[in-house]
Amino acid sequence: MYSKLEVETTKAKKEIVNRNMIETKQSERKRMAIQLTEKNGGKVLEVQVSGKLVHEDYKHFVPEFERLVKQHGKIRVLFEMADFHGWEAGALWDDIKFAPNHFSDIERLAMVGDKQWEKGMSVFCKPFTTAKVRYFDCAAIAQARAWLDQN
């Protein structure tokens, strides 16, 4: 049998662990899973994704993408997947809505990753866009950037 003190101590420890887990999840949520960087005066958009994309990521990404398209017409995109785990349901829906409306706004799409399913994404999206699409392994990111810069 456990003493009352041992039971209370165990309960307190569990509460601390649960609180820490909740705080960790909240701080992870505050960090965007998507980072955007403009290059070549905004004619190239580098999109780095990590973790799982959520609806809030698209609320950040879509207006920036649309702003660059309005300024430059077709743009080139480097889509870098670093420790990427896909989409939450709401973000997947955002992506499904984004693709048919904006794939014609992309001239070249360099997809950079390190997983077989990420490479498969580059093959999957080719029929849905007029953009030139190429996949590069993470180690070849410099080649991906050079390909985007070619005339």
Image (cartoon, rainbow, N blue to C red):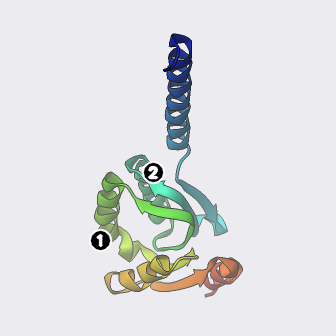
In the rendered structure, which amino acid carries the disc numbered 1? Pro
Residue 28 placed where, x, y %? 54, 43
Q: Residue 100 carries which label?
A: 1
The quarter of the rendered structure image containing the C terminus is bottom right
- The answer to the question of whether label 2 and label 1 lie on touching residues, with beta carbons closer than 8 A, is no
Q: Disc 2 or 1, which lies upstream in sequence?
A: 2
Image x and y of residue 71, in percent:
50, 62
Q: Residue at x 41, y 53 (%)?
A: 58
Amino acid type assigned to the residue bearing label 2 in the image: Asp
Q: Which of 5 and 143 is in front in this view?
A: 5
Vertically, is 93 above or below 21?
below
State which quadrant residue 141 falls in: bottom right
Q: Which residue lies furthest to the front in this view?
A: 1
Number of marks in picture: 2
Q: In which quarter of the image is residue 138?
A: bottom right
Using the image as rendered, state which of residue 138 and residue 65 is in the foreground: 138
- Specify whether 36 is left or right of 86: right
Which mark, by number, is residue 26? Answer: none
Say which residue appears at 45% left-offset and 78% top-offset.
117
Q: Which residue is drawn at 49% across and 81% down?
A: 116
Q: Residue 131, percent across and down?
A: 43, 83
Image quadrant assignment for residue 139: bottom right
Residue 43, image x, y percentages: 57, 70
SS type, badge 1: helix
Q: Nearer the viewer, residue 22 or 39?
A: 22
Q: Who's the residue at 50% across and 11% down the image?
A: 4
Res 57 label? 2
Distance Cα–Cα, label 2 vs label 1:
18 Å
| Residue 122 position (above or below residue 102) | below
Question: Crowdedness of circle 1 by 10 Å Cα count: few (<14), some, many (20+)?
Answer: few
SS for callout 2 = helix
